[in-house]
């Protein structure tokens, strides 16, 4: 089932086109990364999905239709700009937010306490929000996003302000929600955060999709593989070896860039005939490296890999 679909969505502020014919879709039970540097159009895109803003052109469908009163309670939203009532106690605040999302007072209290325990914050239930650290406030905001048990969860820069332990806990919760069939879309400019959690991504630059599709497909299609070699002997000239793009020879260590992964076996055979290979390690380009290599171009939509 397609939970979210954007088709040629465009938004302009003044003479600046912030989102430019953006197209992607999001399947049920998927963690989807909306990636790009600051100012790339991620937050504007999220606000259009939620109908905080309306697109100038294009269509956005949530659960097969425009977001409306009947479907909005199936969506949980964590905004980039956090906002809590600092004088309220944590549990009172969560109960209040739960009631705004359609829960009765008892259910809001039960769910709030359960999530506070899940986030190792049960002892803070009776403390005022202003007494919490920024990271703990972030946990409270995240809990408020989940209180109504939404089917679609939208998180704008959810890792901002979190220490590594809290960030890992957040990832674990996201993976648990996916296993339960929930769908998650989150934006970030910290692309290393999605390496191990996202099923699919769209990389945005200047409001345009630079790459989109399953993470594995993006890596396979656009990630230039490299080989790290430690050896004894004289490496010689590898420029004529099939599939070799570049070589950085440092004497007994070399980094070799290949055209694709299928060339690695041929390279290894070539090397063992000439030197004593002590280490031969193939590595993939990170999503950040792939993104940087693409946005150095002219900003066109480079590719779309179907999800």
Image (tube, rainbow, N blue to C red):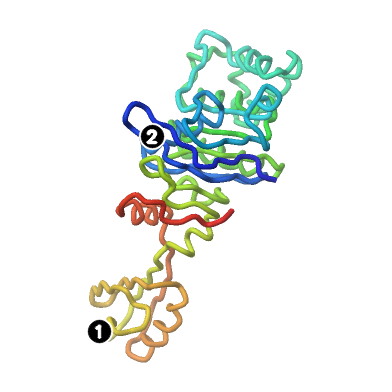
Quadrant of the image occupied by residue 91: top right
- Vertical side of 189 occupied by 121: above or below: above
Q: Secondary structure at mark 2?
A: strand
Judged by depth in the image, the label closer to the viewer, 2 or 1, is: 2
- Vertical side of 293 occupied by 117: above or below: above
Q: Position of residue 222 (x, y in %)?
A: 43, 62
Check the image and name the residue furthest to the top: 87
- Vertical side of 16 occupied by 104: above or below: above
For this view, does 277 lie left or right of residue 24? left
How far apart are the two marked residues, 2 and 1, measured between alpha carbons? Answer: 48 Å
**Residue at horizontal 70 percent and vertical 45 percent from the top:** 1
Q: Which residue is mark 1?
A: 237
Q: Position of residue 251 (x, y in %)?
A: 23, 77
Q: Position of residue 67 (x, y in %)?
A: 63, 28
* Mark 1 surroundings: few (<14), some (14-19) or many (≥20) residues within 10 A: few
Q: Which residue is mark 2?
A: 18
| 54 or 115, nearer to the observer | 54
**Residue at horizontal 29 percent and vertical 82 percent from the top:** 238
**Residue at horizontal 39 percent and vertical 56 percent from the top:** 290
| 163 or 160, nearer to the observer | 160
* Mark 2 surroundings: few (<14), some (14-19) or many (≥20) residues within 10 A: many
For this view, does 285 lie left or right of residue 104? left
């Amino acid at each position: 089932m397609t939970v979210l679909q954007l088709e040629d969505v465009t938004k302009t502020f003044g003479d600046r086109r912030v989102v430019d014919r953006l197209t992607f879709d999001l399947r049920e039970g998927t963690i989807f990364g909306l990636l790009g540097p600051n100012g790339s159009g991620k937050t504007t895109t999220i606000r259009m999905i939620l109908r905080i803003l309306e697109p100038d052109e294009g269509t956005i469908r949530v659960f097969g239709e425009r977001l409306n009163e009947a479907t909005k309670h199936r969506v949980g939203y964590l905004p980039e700009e956090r906002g809590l009532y600092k004088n309220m106690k944590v549990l009172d605040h969560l109960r209040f937010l739960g009631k705004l999302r359609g829960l009765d007072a008892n259910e809001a209290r039960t769910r709030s306490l359960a999530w506070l325990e899940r986030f190792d914050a049960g002892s803070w239930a009776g403390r005022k929000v202003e007494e919490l650290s920024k990271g703990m406030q972030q946990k409270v905001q995240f809990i408020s996003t989940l209180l109504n048990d939404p089917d679609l969860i939208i998180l704008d820069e959810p890792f901002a302000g979190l220490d590594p332990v809290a960030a890992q806990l957040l990832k674990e919760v996201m993976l648990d929600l996916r296993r339960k069939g929930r769908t998650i879309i989150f934006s970030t400019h910290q692309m290393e955060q999605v390496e191990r959690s996202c099923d699919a991504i769209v990389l945005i630059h200047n409001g345009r999709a630079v790459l989109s599709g399953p993470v594995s497909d993006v890596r396979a299609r656009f990630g230039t593989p490299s080989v790290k070699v430690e050896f004894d002997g004289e490496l010689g000239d590898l420029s004529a070896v099939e599939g070799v793009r570049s070589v950085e020879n440092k004497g007994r260590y070399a980094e070799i860039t290949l055209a694709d992964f299928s060339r690695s076996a041929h390279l290894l055979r070539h090397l063992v005939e000439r030197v004593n290979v002590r280490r031969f390690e193939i590595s993939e380009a990170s999503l950040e490296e792939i993104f940087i290599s693409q946005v150095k171009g002219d900003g066109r939509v480079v590719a779309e890999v179907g999800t």
